[in-house]
Amino acid sequence: MNKLNQNIFLIGPMGSGKTTIGKQLAKKFGLEFYDCDHELERLTGASVNLIFDLEGESGFRLRENQLLKKLTAKKGVLIATGGGVVCSEENRRLLRSHGLVVYLKTSIESQLKRLNRDKSRPLLQAEDRTQRLLDLAQVRNPLYDATADLVFSTRNSSVYATAKALSSAILKRLDSFGQEQPDAHG
């Protein structure tokens, strides 16, 4: 596939597939891939958990915002954001103004299944993971919806099949951006 002349930002809750699907999409579109959490860990030399432990969520969010400013300024990138990136109005504005924002929508059940053994996410360290995910969804889902240019529901398909379907949806959405008339593809 030809290289896209458009940045793509994946938003959505933890366990929605932003990193896994993002890597496939970046290859497909010839974009440089960044995962915000992994990039933050690489730059600081500390895990997200350690940053949360030492600086709290507010310290982590400040670092996340500084990194997002640098990454969104790049051209030809696909960025998998952290689940809480949309909690900041400045972050939502940065994403919307620098590329196509895709919300990977998923169910709580799918999140629980995908995150079953995950011990690396500070906000998931709760006695009742289901309730924690429900609480996060109540706050964040409206922000994901309001920020996204495209909402894509992830299913339990393979990563390849999901990436293929999403790449088609992205191309169709980008095609409609350039048209003055409503999208003729239906």
Image (spheres, rainbow, N blue to C red):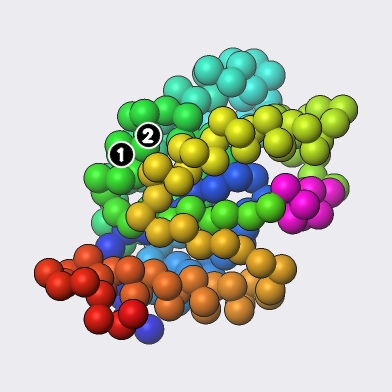
User: SS class of the residue under badge 2?
Assistant: helix
Instruction: Tell me the element at label 1.
Output: helix
Q: Position of residue 74 (x, y in %)?
A: 28, 51
Is residue 43 among the parts visible in the rendering?
no
Q: Which residue is mark 2?
A: 91
Q: Which residues are magenta?
A: 108-116
Dominant secondary structure of the residues highlighted in magenta in the image: helix
Q: Residues within 10 Å of mark 1 (few under 14, many from 20)?
A: some
Q: Is residue 152 left or right of residue 50?
A: left
Q: Is residue 111 above or below residue 47?
A: below
Give the number of callouts: 2
Q: Give the label on residue 67, or none.
A: none
Split into 4 quadrants, where in the image is the C terminus? bottom left
Is residue 115 one of those drawn in magenta?
Answer: yes
Residue at label 1? 94
Q: Are marks 2 and 1 in contact (CB under 8 Å)?
A: yes
Q: Residue at x 64, y 45 (%)?
A: 14
From the top left corner, tell me how far across and down residue 142 is, in percent: 49, 38
Instruction: Please provide percent x and percent y for residue 145.
Output: 45, 46
Query: Residue reaching furthest left?
Result: 180
Q: Mark 1 belongs to which amino acid?
A: Leu
